[in-house]
Image (spheres, rainbow, N blue to C red):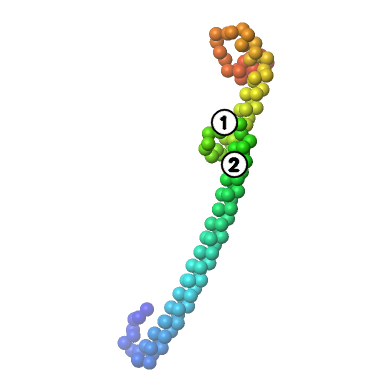
Amino acid sequence: MGEELDSLSLKELQNLEQQLDTTLKHIRLKKNQLMLESISQFQKKDKELQDQNNSLSKQIKEMEKEIPIHHQNHEIMPAFQLDILRNRNICEEARMDCDVEENLRQNQTTTVLPPWMVQHMNK
């Protein structure tokens, strides 16, 4: 700690200084080794994340190709939103074929109920 150095001779002080230099070199080597290992790990993680990002981007592009053009917002959508859009398309197509909706059009009712409510009422 550098205390009580008054009693040491010049030779002992030089020896202590050499020991401190040697120890400091070992400490610096170990510190540099740990830093290089950390950098290497971060570079690996960075590459993994870039690969994952590229893969997800490809998946999004493939999913966007599957969605009809009139539903594309030109925004990146989470997968659950894409599923919602697909399910809505299926429901809309099923409703188009529904007899209840055709009956409503023929009767020209003044109260308009959503098709999902009409379907439940006719069951």
Nearest to N terminus: mark 2 or mark 1: 2
Give the image location of residue 56, x and y in percent. Answer: 59, 46
Residue at position x 54%, y 64% in the image:
40
- The part of the image, by quadrant, that contains residue 9 is bottom left
- Element marked by disc 1: helix
Residue 71 — which label? 1
3 displayed left or right of 87? left
**Vertical arrangement, residue 21 with respect to residue 99, above or below:** below
Q: Amino acid at mark 1?
A: His
- Element marked by disc 2: helix
Residue position for label 2: 61
Residue at position x 35%, y 91% in the image:
10
Of residues 48 and 119, which is closer to you in this image? Answer: 48
Which quadrant does the C terminus fall into?
top right
Which quadrant does the N terminus fall into?
bottom left
27 displayed left or right of 13? right
Q: Amino acid at mark 2?
A: Lys
2 displayed left or right of 70? left
Give the image location of residue 115, x and y in percent. Answer: 61, 18
Residue at position x 49%, y 73% in the image:
30
Give the image location of residue 117, x and y in percent. Answer: 60, 17
